[in-house]
Amino acid sequence: MNNTFTQLENFGHSLKTACYRLQPRSVDEIHEAFQLAKQQGLTVTARGAGRSYNDASLNGGGIVLDLTGMNQILEWEPATGIVRGEPGVTLSQLWQKVLPDGWWPPVVSGTMTTTLGGCLGANIHGKNNFKMGTIGEHVIEFTALLPTGAEVTCSPQKNADLFYSMIGGYGMLGIFTSVTMKMKKIESGLLEVHAWPTRTLKEQLQSLEDGAPNYDYIVGWLDTITIGHGQIHAANYLHGKEDPEPQKTIQLAYQNLPSRLFGVMPKSMLHYFMTPFMNNLGAWGINTGKYITSLRKHTFRQPHAAFHFLLDYVPLWELSYGRSGLIQYQSFLPKETALQAWTEILSIAKRQGLPSYLGVTKRHRPDKFLLTHAVDGFSLAMDFKVTDGSRARMSAMLQEFDQIVLANGGRFYFAKNSETSAATARQFYGEETVEKFRKLKKRCDPNGLLESDLYRRIFE
Amino acid sequence: MSDSPKPAPATPLQPRRRAILIGASQGVGAALARKLAREGYVLALLDRNAELLNKVCVGISADGLSATPYPHDVTDYEAVPALLRRIVADLGGLDLFVYVAGVIHFPALDEYNFEQDRKMVEVNLLGAMAWMSQIAPMFQNAKSGQIVGISSVAGDRGRIGNPGYNTSKAGLSTYLEALRNRLSRHGVNVITIKPGMVKTGMLSLPGAPRPMFAVTPERAADEIAHAIRRRSQVVYVSGLWRLIMLVIRHIPSVIFRRMKF
């Protein structure tokens, strides 16, 4: 047991916590881990790729089940586009399996290193949330092991209450053991991307709102230092004869991200060169430079992998934020209040001298999941550099942000926010939802075996 | 064991360092507990004297800081693995382990007292080994952490005054040195603290020597906390003792065995 004690981190390298890491390879071994935990009086949480920006896959002083070893794609039917995989299967494995047969995962995150279990736990969304919803809406069925020892099968028809609460339940009710999903049929390996600049936050939100119905994907980059400069990328699948060589573009070789910059410099070293820019002045320079280059309205074609997995484009980009890492603050606001709330939030950050170095906006729609983060509106994700000197001030600032978001009917997403308190969570989920969740927790996990640092933060 | 609530989990903007301190109810241990709590550590405090231990914890908690008492006799070696597991889960991890527990008996110059010698070895040395042998592999795997052992200048030479105590502390110093050599390559730091004299209850025991360059427990705690921050290796408290012991360590046996101290 002592030699499983491991220091684990969040995606942003801003939180390090030591846990007993077990690496089960089968459902039986997850079961054994539950038994061990009971016997040792410890709690358990599941971890996939560890790509949440907070404490969702950490369990300080407790057991963490690292499920990356359970990564077999169990079934793939190219005729129907239905795939079944173990929880540790990564999105990278998934798209590489299905693309050559003319399919693509309907919802993907900004990095392909995430696992199916993690994606379901957080109920991730992509740049097409307004159209395709969350990943959970494409799950046909999953199986999960509950701490009671029961293995349950859930779908929108069967055990529907568990289906809609375990997806987006951050592993607090049970551990996914297999996932069956439907892929999206595509006719080309390329997307046609339109890029245009926006001068103000208002214009950016208007662009997302007006653009969404015309595109399969839409995402905004926002310069949160100048507040308002930005760029929209909107993309459509290519159909029929729009791609002259669809057989070629859906091959894996065509999709692969280049490993070297300009064919010379290994990209694995790129983050060292970014580090000097990760301060208020450098980030202003980068954001301004990026805005100037984005002023040209243009259209281009891009492979799916290059369009979606921007975070994988610079390997280990997180390290460029330095020793104390970064955090992400993402808020979801109804379309009626988003502009006002974010104007207020961004001006506070500016006044405090704690600007976000990267801002990303998206268009969203509500969904039926119990612990949903979605709204009929927009989200703004902001990356903040953590430093020893600014921790206390930033903490107070984010509490202030939380109050603004709550007052404007907004929500939060727990693959991202690391500082949100239990009181705030209870307020935006609503008493009824929290009570419903507690009842399910009692039923699935009567002895409180499943706990993560996230669970202790927002539910205790 | 304690039923007080767990400290809140750490977040990136509210990081928490967690420490176990054994022998925390009085003297250097209690002073060090207060010092580390002020520096932001979340503490699990252990001692066999539950009453005094509670007082220390109540004092720390009254200042809005975090310390939880776990009454424990360090000679109850079998209890260590389960208790450690429990404490690490309560703290939400572990960054620092400090072993202060120690007992002393001052024998007469012609007295040989196995019962007392055994007690000193059990508390000062075996208790430390029972805990550190559990914690060393954890820190080694986590590739982080610090282990601090409060040894003594008394471990530097075997003197006519106290063979049993000298032996227990020499054993502890050697054990800590070996741990340091094993663990430093894994990113784990091991500190040997060698206090000279500290104005604690020990100096008022029958047969205790006259205080010489003695420091207050608070001063000792400050210097130990400083060593932890600096990730030092071997530290004399106060620093003057490094010089004194340099001389004493080099006194040739032919002279040392004729000396009266």
Image (cartoon, helix red, strand yellow):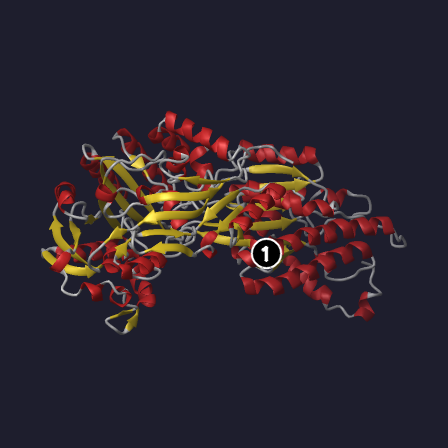
Q: Position of residue A103 (x, y in %)?
A: 27, 55
CA neighbours of label 1 inside 10 A, class few (<14), some (14 to 19), many (20+): some
Q: Position of residue B76 (x, y in %)?
A: 74, 45
Query: Could you say which is closer to the camera, residue B11 or residue B159?
Result: B11
Residue A353: quarter of image: top left
Callout count: 1
Q: Is residue B88 visible?
A: yes
A163 on left or right of A146: left
Indicate the secondary structure of the residue bearing disc 1. Answer: helix
Residue A259: quarter of image: bottom left
Q: Residue at x 51, y 55 (%)?
A: A25
Give the letter of the chain under mark 1: A
Q: Position of residue B13 (x, y in %)?
A: 40, 44
Write down the residue under mark 1: A3
Q: Amino acid at mark 1?
A: Asn
Q: Residue at x 77, y 53 (%)?
A: B121
Query: Could you say which is closer to the camera, residue B170 or residue A138?
Result: A138
Q: Position of residue B58 (x, y in %)?
A: 59, 32
Quadrant into which the C terminus of chain B falls: bottom right
Query: Could you say which is closer to the camera, residue A408 or residue A356?
Result: A408
The furthest residue to the right: B110
